[in-house]
Amino acid sequence: QVQLVESGGGLVQAGGSLRLSCAASGNLFSSSTMGWGRQAPGKQRELVATITSGGTSNYADSVKGRFTISRDNAKNTLSLQMNSLKPEDTAVYYCNLVNWLGSYWGQGTQVTVSS
């Protein structure tokens, strides 16, 4: 059973920074592709950053150059450093784990960016 618990969300002014963390249970973390998705009110969930088990990262165009995804396989943790935040980054942010068993999501953490 995979459990993903996000933390680090909050309210920040435009131009500010936040760092999100995700703690994963079980022994599948190091062999899985991890990611961060977000869902704004009235919109579909979108993946904004992914990182493979080998450490290759990819970003959505909307966050490229501002967000950095990283992982610590020894601690089963995933992070998302978000800089230069914009009001349009406001959303619930979810941790995602993908492997041969399927795709798993955490319960999310709210990020609100005020203008």
Image (cartoon, rainbow, N blue to C red):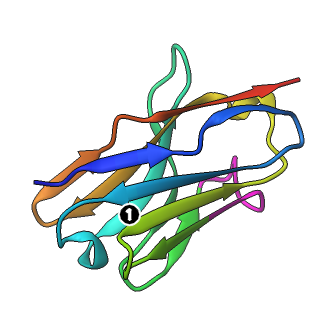
Q: Amino acid at mark 1?
A: Met
Q: Residue at x 45, y 26 (%)?
A: 44
Residue 95: percent from the left, percent from the top?
Answer: 41, 49
Residue found at the very far bottom of the displayed protein: 54
Q: Residue 65 in magenta?
A: yes
Residue found at the very far top of the displayed protein: 42
Label 1 secondary element? strand
Q: Residue at x 45, y 77 (%)?
A: 72
Residue 94 lies in what quarter of the image? top left
> Image check: 4 left or right of 52?
left
Q: Which residue does the numbered mark 1 point to in the structure image?
A: 34
Q: Residue at x 23, y 50 (%)?
A: 3
For disc 1, the neighbor class at 10 Å (few under 14, some 14 to 19, many from 20) is many
Query: What's the magenta region?
Result: 60-68
Of residues 22 and 102, which is closer to you in this image? 22
Main secondary structure of the magenta stretch: loop
Residue 70 lies in what quarter of the image? bottom right
Q: Residue 19 in magenta?
A: no
Which of the image's four quarters has the N terminus? bottom left
Is 71 above or below relative to 74?
A: above
Residue 88: percent from the left, percent from the top?
Answer: 73, 29
Residue 77: percent from the left, percent from the top?
Answer: 42, 66
Residue 99 lies in what quarter of the image? bottom left
> Image check: 94 left or right of 11?
left
Of residues 90 and 20, which is closer to you in this image? 20
> Image check: 31 left or right of 58?
left
Q: Residue at x 77, y 57 (%)?
A: 66
Which of the image's four quarters has the C terminus? top right
Q: How many marks?
A: 1
